[in-house]
């Protein structure tokens, strides 16, 4: 498989892009954790951005809903943000102070679901802004990323509990322990095989769990890779960022891993998304958005 990586600098210093998602308009939308903006980049690298109304919001994960609006977690401001594709913002404050919303996704029920890292809850917000929260069974588990599973439930990582969680749209929670101790699960996504795939930042592995709870793990070839986020690809594969190794990884559904070095040293890749053309976009904390283009063999 032939690939090339292009990197695009974000205007201004210390923007610290983090989350990234594919918009309904075909562009990539991303959060600027320090720049306090929501950015947009087209396939040819043209960028523009929109300042978040709340200062120092700490925007983290971002997702596009079926109508085209972008929803994002404001970790520091304790809010869920929403921006239309023409740049109009709405913000919704969470009921509990210092909940620290982090991961975000759309559920099968059409609502937006998110994790609350400091309050050990899973949140749900409707398009009209009505918020419901569900308590997790344990404390100080640091729920991180969240995604919709092929079973219609929401699946999430519990970073400090070494667990993968599952919550139904009615709020019923189930937890599955990860075989590797202290693995530090972070990113999670629904794979092309119907299973959930997740990264272990401390375990240096990619995990796979079926909707019935059967788990497998695959060791990343590079030691100290510190994988962070993962996204489903277009060719029966998944792609993930290696924050510690300055690489992008690819894993097939049968567990074969390939790694690609990022041109900029110490780029610190975090969020990752795959567009409809199969190209892999990712946010580099060094103030760049990058695209790994996959060429047909």
Image (cartoon, rainbow, N blue to C red):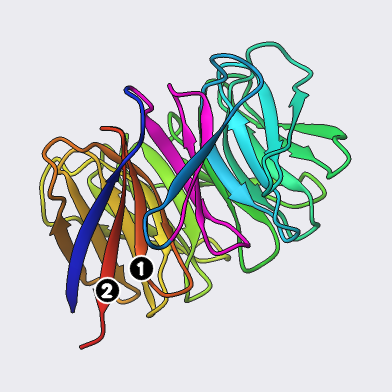
Q: Where does the image place residue 252, in percent across and percent down from the top left? A: 30, 73
Work out whether 59 lies above or below 88.
above
Q: Where does the image place residue 265, in percent across and percent down from the top left? A: 11, 39
For disc 1, the neighbor class at 10 Å (few under 14, some 14 to 19, many from 20) is some
Work out whether 234 lies above or below 11.
below
The quarter of the image holding the C terminus is: bottom left
Report the magenta residues as a range: 14-42
The residue sitting at 82% across, 49% down in the picture is: 170
- Single out the residue that lies furthest toward the bottom: 297
Find disc 1 in the rendering and name its residue. 279
In this view of the protein, which residue sits in the foreground, 25 or 82? 25
Is residue 147 among what the camera can see?
yes
Q: Is residue 69 found inside the magenta-colored segment of the image?
A: no
Q: Is residue 33 found inside the magenta-colored segment of the image?
A: yes
Q: In the structure shown, which secondary structural element does the residue marked by tag 2 occupy?
A: strand
The tag on residue 294 is: 2
Q: Rounded to the nearest whole Å, what is the CA distance between mark 2 and mark 1?
A: 6 Å
Left/right of residue 196 with respect to residue 179 in the rendered view:
right
The residue sitting at 75% across, 22% down in the picture is: 94
In this view of the protein, which residue sits in the foreground, 177 or 296? 296
Q: Where does the image place residue 34, in percent across and percent down from the top left? A: 43, 21
The residue sitting at 51% across, 24% down in the picture is: 36
């Amino acid at each position: 498989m032939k690939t090339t990586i292009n990197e695009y600098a974000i205007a201004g210093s210390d923007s610290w892009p983090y989350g990234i998602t594919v918009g309904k308009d075909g562009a990539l939308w991303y959060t600027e954790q320090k720049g306090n903006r929501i950015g947009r980049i087209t396939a040819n690298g043209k960028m523009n951005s929109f300042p978040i109304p709340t200062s120092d919001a700490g925007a983290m994960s971002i997702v596009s809903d079926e109508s085209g609006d972008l929803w994002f977690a404001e970790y520091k401001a304790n809010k869920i943000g929403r921006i239309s594709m023409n740049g109009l913002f709405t913000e919704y404050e969470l009921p509990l102070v210092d909940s620290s919303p982090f991961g975000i996704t759309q559920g099968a029920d059409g609502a937006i679901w998110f994790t609350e890292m400091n309050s050990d809850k899973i949140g749900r917000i409707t398009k009209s802004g009505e918020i419901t929260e569900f308590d997790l069974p344990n404390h100080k588990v640091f729920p991180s990323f969240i995604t919709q599973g092929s079973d219609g439930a929401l699946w999430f990582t519990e970073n400090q509990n070494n667990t993968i969680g599952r919550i139904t749209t009615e709020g019923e929670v189930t937890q599955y322990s990860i075989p590797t101790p202290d693995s530090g699960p972070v990113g999670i996504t629904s794979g092309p095989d119907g299973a959930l795939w997740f990264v272990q930042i401390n375990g240096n592995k990619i995990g796979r769990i079926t909707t019935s709870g059967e788990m497998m793990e695959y060791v990343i070839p590079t030691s100290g890779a510190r994988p962070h986020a993962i996204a489903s690809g277009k060719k029966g594969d998944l792609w993930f960022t290696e924050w510690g190794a300055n690489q992008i990884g690819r894993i097939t559904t049968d567990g074969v891993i390939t790694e690609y070095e990022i041109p900029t040293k110490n780029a610190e890749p975090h969020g990752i998304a795959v567009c409809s053309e199969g190209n892999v976009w990712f946010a580099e904390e060094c103030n760049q958005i990058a695209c790994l283009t996959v060429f047909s063999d």
